[in-house]
Image (spheres, rainbow, N blue to C red):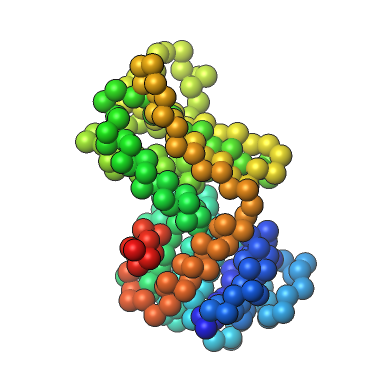
Amino acid sequence: MVKILLCGCNGKMGQVITKIARYREDVKITAGFDISQSVSNDFPVFTRLDDCNVAVDVIVDFSHPSALQNILDYAVSRKIPLVIATTGLSDEQLSKIKQAAASTPILYSANMSLGVNLLLELVQKAAKLLYTNFDIEIVERHHNQKIDAPSGTALALADAINRALPEKYRYVYDRHTRRVKRSKDEIGIHSVRGGNIAGDHTVIFAGSDEIIELRHIANSKEIFGVGALKAAVFMHNKAPGFYTMRDLFGEIN
């Protein structure tokens, strides 16, 4: 059984993961870290990470970008594998994650859904075949409480497409500020916020007289929790290095 320290345990995703873990035999949340003490859990919750004296096998982070450095330092100093699922990280923070991965194993993904990570593979294949004759647009929809826009997943989709192209495309977010025709070398990225949408991402390949859409719809947050726990089991006893959900897929295959 993999023992987990859950960072952000009292947040919405933290509580989803806690619920899912109760019904699994291969994982157990043995400690939590959160600045909020508003939720009662069946494991100790620490408001300061350095106070955590519970032995764990893997850290799962669903907290806040402001907590990242503290979590990285804790994981590196104790050589504990780390799964990072927090969104809204800056390029500088992503660089620090990769630096820390030289000392302890770290898996980072902007989206823990297995379906979304399959979508990342599919859009790359489509982009390789279609980019010369099709315009590429991404539309993402989320609940009205989500702070960052565009979503980390939308950017991950755009990055995946760019990796498949011979030349980098530009990301265009606010087309209403530019009164010019759409250029060929751009990927439009659009955000919708409303209601309680868990997550909805559509990649549109628009050509002459035909449109291809690849879409993933999340009906609940549980899919992200399931993926995070799969990642935690995968990372147990891994060697230091930077890992992604693609590595987990490779092991499944």
Horizontal and vertical percent position of residue 184: 32, 22
19 horizontally vs 135: left or right: right
Residue sitting nearer the eye, 253 or 228 = 253
Q: Number of numbered discs present?
A: 0
Q: Residue furthest left?
A: 166
Image: 110 above or below 207: below
Residue 210, image quadrant: top left
Q: Is residue 200 above or below residue 112?
A: above
Q: Position of residue 159 (x, y in %)?
A: 36, 43
Q: Residue at x 35, y 16 (%)?
A: 208
Q: Nearer the viewer, residue 47 or 108?
A: 108
Residue at figure coordinates x 36%, y 47% from the top left: 121
Dividing the picture into quarters, in which one does residue 40 lie? bottom right
x and y, in percent, of residue 37 in the image: 75, 70
Residue 67 on image: x %, y %? 56, 63
User: In the image, is 18 to the left or to the right of 246?
Assistant: right
**Vertical order, 44 against 160 (above or below):** below
Residue 178 seen in this snapshot: yes
Q: Quarter of the image holding residue 122?
A: top left
Give the residue displayed 33% in from the left and 74% down from the top. Answer: 240
Name the residue nearer the viewer: 86 or 21: 21
Q: Residue at x 45, y 81 (%)?
A: 78
* Side (left or right) of 40 relative to 103: right
- Residue 147 visible in this rendered orientation of the protein: no
Image quadrant containing the C terminus: bottom left
